[in-house]
Amino acid sequence: MRIRILTSLFAVFVSCLSIAGQSGLRPRGDVNCDWTVNIADVNAIIEAIFNDKPYHALYTYAYDINGDHVINISDLNAVIGAIMGDELPPMPTYSGTLPVMYIITEGKRDIVSKDEYVYAMWWLDAMDIDGYTSIGSAEAPLGMQIKGRGNYTWTNHDKKPFRLKFIQALPVLGMPSSQHWVLISGADYWIGQINDALPFEIGRQMGMSWNPRQVPIEVVLNGQYIGLYHMTEKIRVDKNRVNIVKQKDRETDSTKVTGGWLLEIDNYYEPGQIAFTEGNGWHFWVTPHSPEELSYVQRTYMTDFLMHADSAIYCEDKTSTEWERYIDMDSLAVFYIIQEIMDNLEGFHGSCYFHKQRGDSTKLIFGPLWDFGSSFSRYTSTYEFDHFIYDNTSSNLHLRWIAEIAKFPRFQECVRQHWQRFYTEVYPQLDLFLNEFGDKIEAAGNCDHNRWPKSECDNIKGRINFTRNQCLKKKIAWLNEQWGQE
């Protein structure tokens, strides 16, 4: 019923729009977003000048005709000149080497909220790239809702990340069908945009049950090119994603609250979280993603489960196996190894997911992987990547549990076993993966840099090679000294 209502609303939205002429990039000077430069654009700039409208590289980019990051009289003169026949420089555009997603929001509205969705129409041009299929078209767009997402990247970067909810579930770019997707902006991915792609690939080769699939694309929003993005599966309970029982919100049957659970260790407090004090005195915040709204029975069950695990982890006897009743050691070992490979200082600080299937004896499974934006952030020209991620971290980057779990000899032995598999079977494959990934997105990265000059998307292959030689190889070599065969 809900999908039918949303589809009907979208049909009304589309019927009110003229799609003709809106299938490509707007010309420079088109301020009012009608795909032409005319007197309406003059009026829009005059109004912006009188109202001291601030420049923003996403929301008011079109107003800044002369590129001085101020909306002023010279922009007005440029638009008047264009109407009189002057030729303005072209707008930044896509590379043509990746699929292009077109999004047009209802009323050409800006996307300014992480809480409120905006209705939009969209289509995807596969650009005749082998293995990909176009979806919809300018003449036959599809419906969705879109809003902002993320924390630091949303508030501190002009290039914004987005969350998408399609009106109907669809397979996209070879990924299984779903309504729920994420556009990761990579705005702070200085290491060649491999922050997520590389650990996700390692996780796949290491046999993790599921990590988000993602495909690099380019995006045009309301006729403006906004750069290179990573079309990514959103983490959620689903047969094609985190494949566990979907537990109802506010469940009160004690036989059903043992699972499934999809949980995230978070780095800040929000109402509705499961919260307790870790054995070392730090706050421990866990966001429930499925179920989201907890009954007293659900909250009590999972709070007790986590606190019992915490007590077992912080016991004095490190030969104890009590903590293994609550946490699957193999999944944790692989998850931890990947955090170490990427030197991800936030690996157990926030965006740290684990899940639990229904059952009295089921354990917490660490994964899926998510958010490697802080990878190799300790890099300096003199740093040798010769510490574990929980060593010498600042107080605002406390990593939950892992430093204490690392004191258990059985866990260290499990880590060494999985490390041998990584080092002998997976590591030799990574050079090929990195080379192919760099080749795929190099041109799009340069186009992204043209649109966002402050971004670090230029020279993608050079950045990947630098990261490989100055960060990745050094960290792996040091880890192999710790965990490799003697």
Image (tube, grey):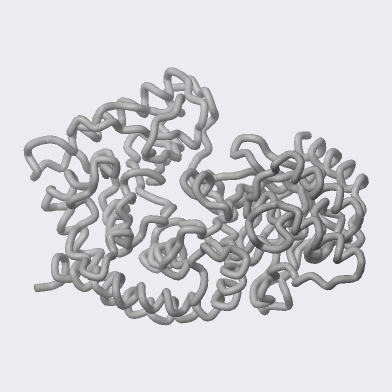
Taking the spot 66% from the left edge, 62% from the top edge, the residue there is: 67
Location of residue 350 (image quadrant): top left
In this picture, is 8 found above or below 418?
Answer: above
In this view, 455 is above or below 389: below
Q: Is residue 322 left or right of residue 260?
A: left
Q: Note whether residue 359 is visible.
A: yes
Residue at 46%, 46% (x, y): give it: 152
- Residue 398 on image: x %, y %: 26, 42
Q: Nearer the viewer, residue 448 or 169?
A: 448
Q: How many marks?
A: 0
Residue at the (24%, 32%) spot, across then down: 282
Observer able to see residue 353: no
Q: Position of residue 181 (x, y in %)?
A: 61, 51
Is 31 rendered above or below residue 261?
below
Query: Residue lying furthest top in this view?
Result: 296
User: Residue 119, position in %: x, y?
Assistant: 76, 43
Q: Nearer the viewer, residue 224 or 68?
A: 68
Above or below, 399 against 414 in this view is: above
Q: Quadrant of the N terminus?
A: top right
Q: Position of residue 299 (x, y in %)?
A: 41, 23
Q: Residue at x 67, y 79 (%)?
A: 130
